[in-house]
Image (spheres, grey):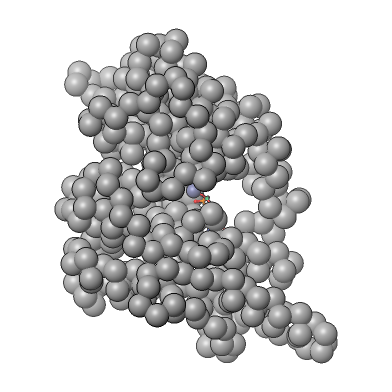
């Protein structure tokens, strides 16, 4: 380790990925080990919280050891331990939290509790360190759909959020109804790439001038569409259905994010969270923003889905501001942007 470098060990166990990363100065990823439980949860069609906690318990020691080895870094090289403390599954969060607290105590270094949603936004700062504020972020994951205005580091103004299901959640539910495997987003994307998005028209909930989202009406409409086709014995093209359904979500996400970016007069938008892995969402949003002279930052796919490197990046900026946690830090499953 070079002198003056701030090296953070970061842990992420909020859902079904056990991840440990070593991040230097908030931008250099020395290691980012992700052990995914997706295959285990696939047979149940979604994440089973009890199984997730147990698997985190089995994995965490190995994942941390592997991250330190890859980073060629010993415990004595660490300046802080960071961990996601919410939002997420409580039992899953507690595994990372307990490990992080024990490590911070044993090594006598600061503990930094990180908000998972903020961490997703900071995945953009891993790609582009010099970002001029203010920025607007679209956070789209399995649990969240938010448009966030960020005037400076660590400050988040929620401009819009989903009033019911998250975008990724709807993709997962529809995929399940179509007989596709979990997680549904990538499966729908694969089908949609060969489909015609205009063949079937699904409803968009615009909600007036609000930056909020609502996807439950769309979900019901697609489920009815699939059910009715089945009842009538009609063969529908899964590719066209997937393309039309995906488009109905993305069109609203893109329209509202662009509107927020223009209203807030930002130069930069960040697209983050698991759904940001989708190529059509990335390219269509980029194109729409480019026409307004706004640039889009999207992390590479492995940094869009849950990982600890983004936690290490967010923690770096908290470290610089002296925002540390004490050993009473607890898991907050429904943590919002206020925390
Ligand atoms: O951020 P993430 O890994 O976990 C949460 O914090 O929720 O996001 C997972 C979500 C799932 O709903 C998954 O279906 C969706 O991201 N997803 C995608 C793609 N890859 C993952 N959705 C659309 N296209 C993708 N390529
Ligand atoms: Zn996430």
- Residue drawn at (71%, 37%), measured in percent from left and top? 50
Q: Which corner quadrant holds the C terminus?
A: top left
- Residue drawn at (58%, 28%), measured in percent from left and top? 95
Q: Which corner quadrant holds the N terminus?
A: top left
Does residue 172 sit above or below 16 in this rendering?
A: below
Q: Position of residue 114 (x, y in %)?
A: 40, 36
- Residue drawn at (24%, 57%), measured in percent from left and top? 135
Q: Position of residue 212 (x, y in %)?
A: 42, 68
Does residue 107 sit above or below 157 in this rendering?
A: above
Residue 4 lies left or right of residue 339; in this view the side is left
Does residue 112 sit above or below 16 in this rendering?
A: above
Res 184 → quadrant: bottom right
Q: Is residue 18 visible?
A: no
Q: Position of residue 150 (x, y in %)?
A: 26, 53
Residue 58 lies left or right of residue 7; in this view the side is right
Of residues 314 and 220, the one drawn nearer to the viewer in this rendering: 220
- Residue drawn at (65%, 76%), measured in percent from left and top? 220
Q: Position of residue 128 (x, y in %)?
A: 25, 49
Of residues 159 and 218, the one drawn nearer to the viewer in this rendering: 159
């Amino acid at each position: 380790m070079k002198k003056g470098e701030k090296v953070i060990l970061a842990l992420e166990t909020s859902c079904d990925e056990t991840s440990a990363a070593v991040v230097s100065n908030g931008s250099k990823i020395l290691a980012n080990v992700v052990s995914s439980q997706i295959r285990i949860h696939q047979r149940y069609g979604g994440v089973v919280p009890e199984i997730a906690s147990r698997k985190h318990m089995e994995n965490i020691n190995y994942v941390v050891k592997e991250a330190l080895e890859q980073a060629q870094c010993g415990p004595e090289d660490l300046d802080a331990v960071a961990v996601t403390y919410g939002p997420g599954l409580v039992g899953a969060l507690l595994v990372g939290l307990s490990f992080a607290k024990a490590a911070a105590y044993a090594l006598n270094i600061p503990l930094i509790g990180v908000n998972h949603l903020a961490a997703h936004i900071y995945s953009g700062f891993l790609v582009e360190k010099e970002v001029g504020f203010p920025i607007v972020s679209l956070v789209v994951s399995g649990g969240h759909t938010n448009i966030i205005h960020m005037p400076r580091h660590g400050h988040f103004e929620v401009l819009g959020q989903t009033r019911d299901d998250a975008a990724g959640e709807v993709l997962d539910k529809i995929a399940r109804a179509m007989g596709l495997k979990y997680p549904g987003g990538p499966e729908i994307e694969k089908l949609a790439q060969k489909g015609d998005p205009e063949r079937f028209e699904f409803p968009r909930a615009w909600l007036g001038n609000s930056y909020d989202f609502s996807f439950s009406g769309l979900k019901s409409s697609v489920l009815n569409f699939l059910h009715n086709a089945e009842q009538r014995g009609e063969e529908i093209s899964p590719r066209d259905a997937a393309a039309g359904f995906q488009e109905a979500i993305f069109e609203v996400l893109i329209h509202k994010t662009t509107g927020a970016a223009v209203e807030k007069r930002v130069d930069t938008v960040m697209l983050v969270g698991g759904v940001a892995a989708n190529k059509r969402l990335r390219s269509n949003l980029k194109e729409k923003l480019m026409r307004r002279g706004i640039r889009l930052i999207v992390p590479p796919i492995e940094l869009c889905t849950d990982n600890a490197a983004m936690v290490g990046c967010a923690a770096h900026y908290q470290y610089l501001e002296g925002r540390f946690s004490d050993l009473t830090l607890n898991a907050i499953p429904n943590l919002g942007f206020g925390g």
